[in-house]
Every structure is written in structure tokens, then in C-alpha cells.
Amino acid sequence: MNVHDKYGPLTLWEKFYLAPILAGLWLTSKHFFRNLGRHILRAVGIKSRAMGAVTIQYPEFLRPLFPRLRTMHRLTRREDGTPRCVACMMCETVCPAKCIYILADEKLENPQIEKMLHSFDIDLGLCIFCGYCVEACPEDAIRMDTGILELSNVSRNGMVLDMETMLNLKPDGSRYAQYDKNGDIISNAYIQQPKKS
Amino acid sequence: MSDPTRHFVGKETKFLEEGVYGENFIVTSVDRILSWARLSSIWPMTFGLACCAIEMMATAASRYDLDRFGAGVMRPSPRQTDLMIVAGTVTLKMADRIKRLYDQMPEPKYVLSMGSCATSGGPYWQHGYHVLKGVDLIVPVDVYVTGCPPRPEALIDGVLKIQDKIRKESVIKRKLQERSNV
């Protein structure tokens, strides 16, 4: 059955389409003023359960990250400052994207540890951030907990991480969500970045 | 200065030609306004090919809003856009279409390569017989954003880098130099 037969032709008022336009504007302005009111109350200090818009104003505000998130890689050091990595090539073998390139050197000072790194490159343009290298490493030498998510560059060669860069990265706890000793999350609020001058 | 065209240019734009092009405050102010207008309203053409498209949709959604940076108007037609976000694995069949659509974009145009697959073939670089190993083999890429898929924060960071690139460009200064070199 044709829909035009069921509902009949449009009246002049319906063709003019003014009532649906006003209904749509009413809906939009209702949300707008509701959000405005809630944001103003929050800015003044009256906290309530009702939230305004859920937008995170990146880069001034950051979303808190969780501990198992796989971000940029870093190499760890032993207590005496040398890298933990013994160049066993486990991470290079298990990497699904084959993005790790390792060259080994001989460690002459300590005969118990035979090998050390000559060079360790990760091509972030190939990496799929699966975390297999972290699981495969027997020495806990590589971790993905730096909290650096901004991996963009203007050239492909600029995305190759070398050993020096990765050894000097520190785990950044400030971007992660904080937990108390029972394991409950302390605050889910967005992390505010310090104002850049 | 015996060339009549140079003399004509000198007469018309004499008050703008003091010193080296670009040191004049009128030229730099107009350039800054034009660059600000261009970078605040980048219209992206989203080339969502694979999983990175989901993260691009998430970036354009309400939690990480791309519209705050002016890049929220996602046009499906290349004739109306100035940024092409190649998001996902580029197969050889699709590469032909990407080149064709890039040619249809009007100048000035920029390309952002999103994800590991668009940057360099990703995990398929070794054995993928059907994959183009990086979209910069067919179109010139301005910013690469890596990740699998890159988080919305990373994509917003890439768009901010494109904005920095546009901010450094100058329209009036380049036109003056072109006219004086004629």
C-alpha cells in the first residue's frame, strides 16, 4: 500500500515545515542550556551527580590511563645503570610485525652475563603495539608503560626509536589513574595539565 | 630596473616592498590572519578503510571532539575538503582510487596517514602481497600518526601538527615573491 494513500497529501501548514523546525531548535537549545547550567555550577563549585557534556578538553585535560595500556616502549636499567637487556633476541623473534632490530655486543666485564646491546631499534611505523615483546622478555628489560600516546611525526624515518631514547624514558605515573591500597580507584576525574606559559 | 613589468610591480606595491618580503608588518599580519583562518577550519575527508576508521569516528564523537579544532565537518566528497585522513590498510585495489581522489582535491591540500598500515604497511609489510606498503608511495604525506590503532589523543595531536604546518605557511609573501620573480 502506498504511503501517500495512507496519510493523504500534506496540508499547507505541514508543507511549510515550521513546526518541526521549531521542535528541533527547542531540543537543541534545551540541551545547550542544560549543559551550560551544569558547567557553570561545576565551575562555581557545586558538584552534583548530573554531568554536562562529557567532552575531554584535550590537550588541556587528559583522560586517566589504566595500568595495562600499551604505550610507547622503554628499556629498563639494572641498579648499576647498565641496561637489563642481554640481546637474547626473544622480542625480535616473537614480534608479529618484525619491527625490532637488535645488534648484540660482547660483555667482557662480567662473564656471567655474556651479551649486551650494541643497538636496539624499534620502528614505530611498523609496530602494532601488541605487547608480545614485553611478555617474551625473560629479563623484564622492555616495558610499555611510559604513558606517551602522542606518536606522530612528519617523516617515516623520525619514528624509529633507538636505544638511547628508550633507555632514557621514565614511566610517567602522572597520566595514569591513581589507586589506593585496597585496589579501588581514587578518582576518575580528568587530569588537568599545567598551563603552558 | 629597465624591465617594464618590474617597474609596474614596484609602483603598485611600493608600500609593501620595504626591506625583505615578510619584514613588513602589514604583510605578516595579513598572512597570520589568513593562516589562522585556514587552520581553524580544516575540513577532513575521512578515508576510513579499516579499524583505524573506528578510532577516527571515536575522535569525532563527543568524548574527544574534533569539532573543537574546527575539523568536525567531515565531507564525503574530495572536492570540498582540504585534509585527507587515510585511516586503515591500503590495498593495491584501493590505491588506484586513493590516487584518483587525491587528484580531485583542490589546493591547498594535506594528507594525514593514520595508523601503522597506512604509514608503512604495518604488520603486512613482509608477506602482504595485496597491501601497499605505506600510502606515501602514491600521495605526499604531511603527518604520520602511528599506532594500531592510534588513540584519539594521538590523532588529535596529528591534526595539531597539521595546524602548525599551516601556521608557518604564508600566502601574501609567496604571491609577492612570485610576482617579483616574473
Image (cartoon, coloured by chain):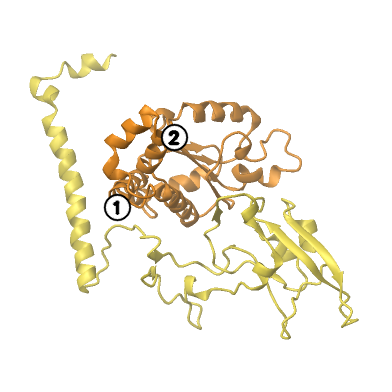
Chain colours: A yellow, B orange
Looking at the picture, does residue B105 appear above or below residue A161? above
Q: What residue type is labelled 1?
A: Phe
Q: How crowded is mark 2: few (under 14 residues within 10 Å), some or many (20 or more)?
A: few
Looking at the picture, does residue A167 appear above or below residue A21? below
Q: Is residue A34 left or right of residue B171?
A: left
The residue that appears at 20% across and 59% down in the rendered structure is A36
Mark 1 or mark 2: which comes first in sequence?
A: 1
Number of numbered markers? 2
Position of the C terminus of chain B by quadrant: top left
Q: Residues within 10 Å of mark 1 (few under 14, many from 20)?
A: few
Could you say where residue B4 lies in the image, as x and y percent from the top left?
36, 27
Towards the viewer: A190 or A108: A108
Q: Which chain carries label 2?
A: B
Towards the viewer: B165 or B88: B165
Looking at the picture, does residue B26 appear above or below residue B139? below
Towards the viewer: B179 or B1: B1
| Gap in angstroms between the C-alphas marked 1 and 2 | 22 Å
Q: Mark 1 lies on which chain?
A: B
Does the rendering let one see residue A129? no
Instruction: Find residue B25 and name its label.
Output: 1
The residue that appears at 54% across and 67% down in the rendered structure is A147
Secondary element under disc 2, as helix, strand or loop, is loop
Q: What residue type is labelled 2?
A: Asn
Instruction: Find residue B181 and name its label.
Output: 2
